[in-house]
Image (tube, rainbow, N blue to C red):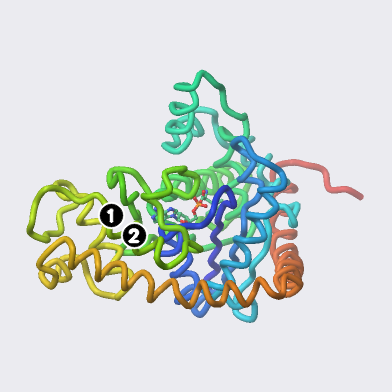
Amino acid sequence: MTRVFSGIKPTGHLTLGNYLGAMRQWAAVDQHQADALFCIVDLHGMTVDHDPARLRRLTRQAATLLLAAGLDPELCTVFVQSHVDEHTRLSYLMECVATDGEMRRMIQYKEKVASEAVRGRSVRLSLLTYPALMAADILAYGADEVPVGDDQAQHVELTRDLAVRFNQRYGHTFVVPKATVPKVAARVMNLQDPMSKMGKSDDSGPGVVYLLDEPEVIRKKIMRAVTDSGQEVVYDREERPGVANLLEILAACTGGNPESLATVHDSYGALKRATADAVLDVLGPVQARHKELCVDPGYVEEVLRHGAEKARAISRPIVDTAYRAIGLLPPG
Ligand code: TYM
């Protein structure tokens, strides 16, 4: 059976981008068709300035939202990265296989360094080594497929390179994984700045739809989305990025395709109304289920405890094999 692994970082409130680019596919397809593991990658949440209490709260909230979005612990494994030591054990080996040049070429790293440099600050070392930990996350489980949004494809590509290199140098150890990216909404853009990704760590609230925003807030954000001065609804990512983004969101929520939806709506106002309705239809049940789950935090904890046990049982032997292959003496 195909094994699938993916992760989500608890650095902010989860967004419509996370949902359409990743979570929805995990719940609707991956957990039914594969042996699937989904991880709240809290260690990755410490690569930028963080507040300990907030990290803990967001980790719990992300777990609750994954279940609310439809992940079923009977069908898949949901767990927290720091509960399974294999991630950090293997991450160090990945650092011994990767080069600093490879890490520095990662787009997310370059963007973050550039934005911090503007403020005259240096970044945490773990931000540079982030892709080594992400490679470890994936390779520790022998994952065949990694369902992610477009922005993570480069990290998965590096993971493939590291797996191939390790296998060539030290003998076949790792499955070489591939990224699977959704056909629509692989990169949901910020509603106020359609040239940038809708990101959870952005403070630009008006351009970001958070999964737990109140319905009227979601509607307002979509109705105020930046479009352009044109009149006609056409799907053109280059020339009309704002309108294209709305069409992609609508397509992802209704199962249509952006080109044909462009012919259905004859004004930007109509397109925005339809998009807001579609997003609310999709997020309504997620919000309702989230509310129910919050009443019983013990249930979520139990899911995570059991998930970590299952994750350990899979990753331990794979990481042990890698330790032996690279030349480390097994303990007694
Ligand atoms: P993260 O937490 O930024 O995002 C989680 C998932 O959501 C997708 N995503 C989006 N998709 C479409 N449009 C958007 N605007 C958007 N924003 C986010 C991301 O592509 C991702 O699939 N490094 C990863 C977490 C990670 C991971 C892993 C993923 C750590 N280890 C191993 C897969 C496998 C990250 O920061 O995702």
Q: Residue at x 56, y 32 (%)?
A: 128
Look at mark 1 in the image and give the residue it sits on: 224
What is the quadrant of residue 257 in the picture?
A: bottom left
The residue type indicated by label 1 comes to Arg
Q: Is mark 1 within 8 Å of ligand 1?
A: no
Q: Residues within 10 Å of mark 2 (few under 14, many from 20)?
A: some
Q: Which mark is residue 283?
A: none
Residue 238 as seen in the image, left or right of residue 131: left
Q: Position of residue 331 (x, y in %)?
A: 88, 48
Q: Which residue is mark 2?
A: 220
The one nearer the camera, 307 or 13, is 13
Quarter of the rendering occupied by the N terminus: bottom right
Mark 2 touches mark 1? (CB < 8 Å) = yes
Residue at x 28% of width, y 43% of height: 195
Q: Position of residue 225 (x, y in %)?
A: 27, 53
Helix, strand or loop at label 1? It is loop
**Residue 25 shown left or right of residue 96 in the figure:** left
Residue for point 82% across, 43% down: 329
Q: CA distance from mark 2 to mark 1?
A: 6 Å
| SS at badge 2 | helix
User: Quick check: can you spot residue 36?
Assistant: yes
Q: Is residue 145 visible in this depiction of the protein? A: no
Q: Amino acid at mark 2?
A: Lys
